[in-house]
Amino acid sequence: MKFITYNQKNFNKIEYLKSIPVEIKKEIEIVSKVLPFKTNNYVIDYLIDWDHYENDPVFILNFPNRDMLSEKQYEMVEKAWNDKIPDEEFQRLVNKIRLQLNPHPAQQMTNIPKLDGIPLEGCQHKYQDIVLFFPSEGQTCHAHCTFCFRWPQFVKDLDLQFSMREIEMVLEYIRRNENIHEILFTGGDPMVMSPKTISKYIHKIFEADIKHLDIIRFGTKSLSYWPFTFIPAFSDEAEEMLHLFKQITDQGMHLSFMAHFNHPNEMDNNAVQEAIYNIRETGAEIRTQAPVLKNINNSGKIWSDMWTKQVNLGMIPYYMFVERETGPYRYFELPIAEVYDIYTNAIRYSGSLAKTVTAPVMSASQGKVHIMGIVDNDISSERYFMMQYIRNRNIEETYKPFLMHYDAKATWFDQLTKVKEPIVM
Ligand code: SF4
């Protein structure tokens, strides 16, 4: 199957769009001036039910719509577009709106480490044992998710991207930090890179021969957006890619695919199932993660179906996240209490092998906060969230339960206040 990308430039070539009313197409086009838009022939042909596209979860996941901007933002872009203002002026307006969308949540810019005083611009080191590496060639995806928390990576003229090619510097940094055991290739999606490019990076890891570096991870949505990367019958490079994975595991390193699935529909066809099988045959494991998103997967049944399918296909449910405060998050966000409710409804009805998931989790500035439960104080009639950091910049702060005052409307950690006073229950 041939890979065909559609983005803003060739948007009108998408055959299926013919059935969509002109005004909706115009809205997609206008919002995609601000939010990066990209799709491909696999997503369009295999994942979207075009007879019911308005409510189709993958359509909403992949195609921007006007409610993803505020009314005011939308009207400003629409007017500028209709008035055909000069390109430069238009771009300035678009970038101004992008900056209103909190492009780097959770203080990501503060996670850039230094080697001999030189910032490693394509690297993040937040938790003791792992570094994130953003290879320059992997800073796009096969298709873009409308909710994406990494969307500034795809906006070239905003100058907010992380990326680098010099893995040698990252490896030297790892060599000097014995607590680092894992390197996570991320993006965008590192699986957009050719096997030759990935192989160059991987062989540099082998050559560096750092005894305390045991684990290679790839954060990827390729299984969902272009599974042919892992099916030799469809892609010449797939054989090479699978061979590379086998080399990693033969080297005695642990290889983990952090696969991103947002809805059970993404796992229903033969292509994705074959790709999963082929990856597992190399000795790699596949762990799954995704946020809870209003309008896409906000029900316990969807999550329990998703985990059940994942387990049946040999994958390991890993994280369920609370949607981050970036991009069009107002369209997708849900109160923390509701996400917790979705989680409990999902996990209760999932089999025991799905209980590997840690959920729900917020990736906040200080670390990953796990919502452990909602606690009622029968004496004072107060209600609390019980939480703990499962990851923290300061490892000493992990796995210490604490209470936050309950707020049924709060959608993010910083909207809550910590319980400081002693309580009697
Ligand atoms: S696949 Fe991941 S990085 Fe790429 S657009 Fe989707 S959420 Fe963003």
Image (tube, rainbow, N blue to C red):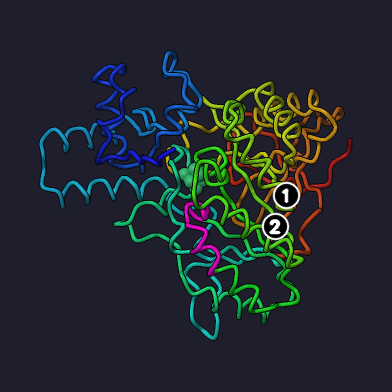
Query: Is 398 part of what is drawn in magenta?
Result: no
Residue drawn at x 69%, y 78% as measured from the top left: 209
Main SS of residues in magenta:
helix
Residue drawn at x 22%, y 49% as measured from the top left: 91
Query: Is 194 part of what is drawn in magenta?
Result: yes
In the rendering, at what x and y percent does residue 285 appear?
A: 72, 49
Left or right placement of residue 291 versus residue 118 in this view:
right
Q: Is residue 292 above or below residue 252?
A: above
Query: From which residue to which does the magenta span run?
Result: 187-200
Question: Does residue 326 appear anywhere in the picture?
Answer: no
| Helix, strand or loop at mark 1 | strand
In the rendering, at what x and y percent does residue 352 appear?
A: 85, 32
Q: Disc 1 marks which amino acid?
A: Glu
Q: Badges 2 and 1: C-beta atoms under 8 Å apart?
A: yes
The residue at the far right in this view is 425
Name the quarter where the C terminus is drawn.
top right
In the rendering, at what x and y percent does residue 234 appear?
A: 50, 41
Q: Is residue 34 above or below residue 107?
A: above
Circle 1 packing at 10 Å, graded few (<14), some (14-19), many (20+), is some
The residue at the far bottom in this view is 116
Name the quarter where the N terminus is drawn.
top left
Q: Disc 2 marks which amino acid?
A: Leu
User: How many numbered discs, if any?
Assistant: 2
Left or right placement of residue 154 versus residue 273 in this view:
left
Residue 285 circle label = 1
Question: Does residue 98 appear anywhere in the picture?
Answer: yes
| Helix, strand or loop at mark 2 | strand
Residue drawn at x 43%, y 41% as measured from the top left: 143
Residue 255 circle label = 2
| Nearer-the-camera pick, 265 or 107 | 265
